[in-house]
Amino acid sequence: MKIFSVRLTSLFGLLSFLVLFGASSKGAFAQDGEKLFKSYCAACHSAGSNMLVGPGLAGVEDRYDKEWLYKWIKNSQELVKSGDAQAVEVFEKYNKVLMPAQPVNNEEIDAILAYVKEHNAAKEEAPAAAAGGATAEMSSGESSDSSDQTTYIVLGSILVLLILISVLRKVQHSLQIVEARKRGEDVPEETGMWDGFTSWMNGNKRIVALIGIVLIALIAKAGWDAALQIGVYNGYEPEQPIKFSHKLHAGDNGIDCNYCHTSASFSKSAGIPSPNLCMNCHTYIQEGPQYGKEEIAKIYDALDFDPVTKTYGDNQKPIKWVKVHNLPDHVYFNHSQHVTVGKIACQKCHGDVETYTVGKQSEDLTMGWCIDCHRETKVQMDGNEYYDEIHKRLPEDLKKQYLEDGTITVSELGGMECAKCHY
């Protein structure tokens, strides 16, 4: 009996470990390459092949030696000044745009490069979208698949353990029968699994208490995580009344985001382009490469425009676009402050828009995400008159304190104050 009790205790201990492992494994192997890329690289580079301020990073490991990349990313200007032929060639190729030194180590660079590689591999493996148009979906991506897989593993492990416990109980009872017959005693009755379980619990109260505490903690953690996801719609990509392709306009044709979202540079809101703006091009471009005349005709219909006579009628009606990005009412966010003053690229918050068809939400837009950005994003001081004026007003002791590491982050300029975003 003692041997069986020890075995049963071990099995329940293993079961508790598997449950704990299942709950924690979702984030245990998460890579920080994407976070590092968005903190240090996304303002100037895309993870794809398109050009922003600097070149796209797709295939960068195939073009350059890894050791050379370490040196270039950490301090490109030092490498250029040393006369390195490849560094000089790259510097001149991209119009001698200065790339600031980055405070990253080799492991962090490896994580960034791994993210870039996985990002492009995922794009290549993704199936082509059907020509009939996109449907509204809420996608949780690979994390959802990983979560489902973990759940199946834990449930399977629990089932196997229950079977093992049942088998061991049968073996135990058979041994009890043999021993009772040897001693000439009455054969003991076989107890049910529940009776055996309650008996084990009564004899191992400390272990039961420990398992109970762990289960309560796991349930509380699961509830907390679920609460954190309320109102978070990362990956939200609703169907729109017109299948507008960001890939075609911003990617293939290189149209600046601010051309269509004109108010982003001087207003709180980026704005939704009016059909009149579309007509700057589509008065004459009346057929697209993917949908032909079908989608452009919807613009004409909204404006009551006759593409033959090029005249407008009186039966105009609004296009009912579906809003993608929704911040809570108690949050203040100003596009112009980020785009014009902060020089933040659209891709920093909206992802690789130039690869999208209809718009979608790339980030979770939670408070924690914004705070991380304010803590880690370096303010671009050079050539920015707004910050030149701040430097003039800054006391010398604070100037020395903030510039000690050679960089200034948004948080050091008051970006962590509650009233900056909530008032």
Image (cartoon, rainbow, N blue to C red):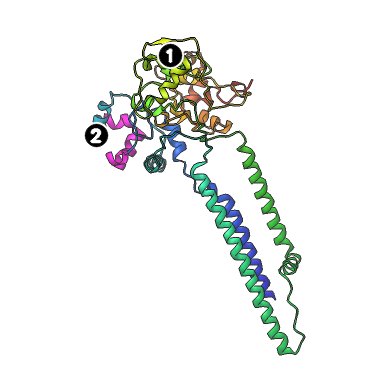
Give the residue at mark 2: 86
Task: Quadrant for residue 33, please give it.
Answer: top left
Residue closest to the far left = 85
Give the residue at mark 1: 305
**Who is closer to the viewer here, 384 or 262?**
262
Q: What stretch of residues is rendered in magenta?
A: 59-82
In the figure, is residue 405 to the left or right of 195? left
In the figure, is residue 218 to the left or right of 185? left
Question: Is 72 covered by the magenta stretch?
Answer: yes
Relative vertical location of residue 387 with respect to residue 221 in this rendering, above or below: above
**Who is closer to the viewer here, 271 or 78?**
271
- Nearer the observer: mark 2 or 1; the answer is 1
Give x and y (percent) for residue 8: 66, 68
Mark 2 → mark 1, Cα distance in angstroms = 55 Å
Tell me if residue 152 can be seen: yes
Label 2: how many residues lie within 10 Å, few (<14), some (14-19) or many (20+)? some
In the figure, is residue 192 to the left or right of 79? right
Q: Amino acid at mark 2?
A: Gln
| Secondary structure type for disc 1 | strand
Residue drawn at (54%, 53%) of the image: 150
Give x and y (percent) for residue 377: 47, 28
